[in-house]
Image: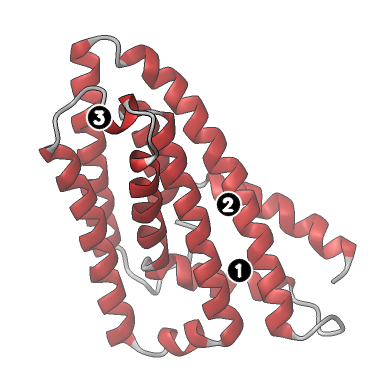
Amino acid sequence: MALETLLLFLPAAFLLSLVPGPDNLGVLALGLAQGRREALGFALGCSAGCLNHTLLAALGVTALLRGSPLALGALQWAGAAWLAWIGWQTLRSRPGISPQEAAPDVEGFTQQFRRGLIANAINPKVALFFLAFLPQFVSPQGWATGWQIAVLGLLFAICATLIFSGIALTAARLGGWLRRHPRSAATLHYGSGLLFLALALRLLLSPLDAQPRAG
């Protein structure tokens, strides 16, 4: 894989990770409303989900899914349902500092990691994005196509980890100050739940044949 290819790919991966979507908006909302641990968990889960899409693209599974409107539609409904469930669970819980944030264990982190992983892994728009984006940087004179896609996908996941973690830490710092005020804490808490519901609706209503995006 040529160095010139990587020098083009990495800035593009960083910029695309910043494009507003369910992943980075979810990280932002959790950082503001719940704190660093939960936001970092969701951020790393979303980044790990990119590896799932990389594997599917490298094996050609995503290309097969693209040819099946029924399978893509099922994934779209599943992804929207999962985001809506996260939003509903957030709205049902009480605002303020959660027991997970106050306790020394990592329950809040692992729960949000699992949520982020699933939210990204079953998002068909991310799958189609990887199928459209990664092959553009594959060199016919390089390694086998599958291996090049695997390396590019891993690099994209690393870029996403850095961007999402930065968003998580920044939002958590700001949210920590805002959550000291009961009214602000409640607004952030319920606002994050409503954001996940809005993201679910956005995913459900967006056409899958539109230009693929990272989120």
Of residues 126 and 53, the one nearer the viewer is 53
Q: Amino acid at mark 2?
A: Leu
Residue 212: x and y, percent?
A: 48, 66
Query: SS for tag 3?
Result: helix
* Residue depicted at x 37% and y 21%: 175
**Mark number displayed over residue 99:** 3
Do tag 2 and tag 1 residues touch (Cβ < 8 Å)?
yes
**Residue 117, picture quadrant:** bottom left
At 51% across and 34% down in the image, what residue appears? 167
Q: Position of residue 122 (x, y in %)?
A: 36, 68
Q: Amino acid at mark 1?
A: Phe
Give the Cα distance between marks 1 and 3: 41 Å
User: Mark 1 or mark 3: which is in front?
Assistant: 3
Q: Quadrant of the C terminus?
A: bottom left
Give the quarter of the image for residue 139.
bottom right
- Judging by the rendered image, the residue that carries numbered circle 2 is 16
State the image coordinates of residue 141 (x, y, percent, origin top left). 87, 84
- Residue underneath mark 1: 133
Image quadrant containing the N terminus: bottom right
In the picture shown, does residue 170 fall above or below 123? above
The image quadrant of residue 54 is bottom right
Residue 20 visible to an observer of this rendering = no
Q: Which class describes the residues within 10 Å of circle 2: few (<14), some (14-19), or many (20+)?
A: some
Q: Position of residue 147 (x, y in %)?
A: 72, 79
| Residue closer to the observer: 207 or 100 | 100
**Residue drawn at point x = 26 percent, y = 78 percent:** 74
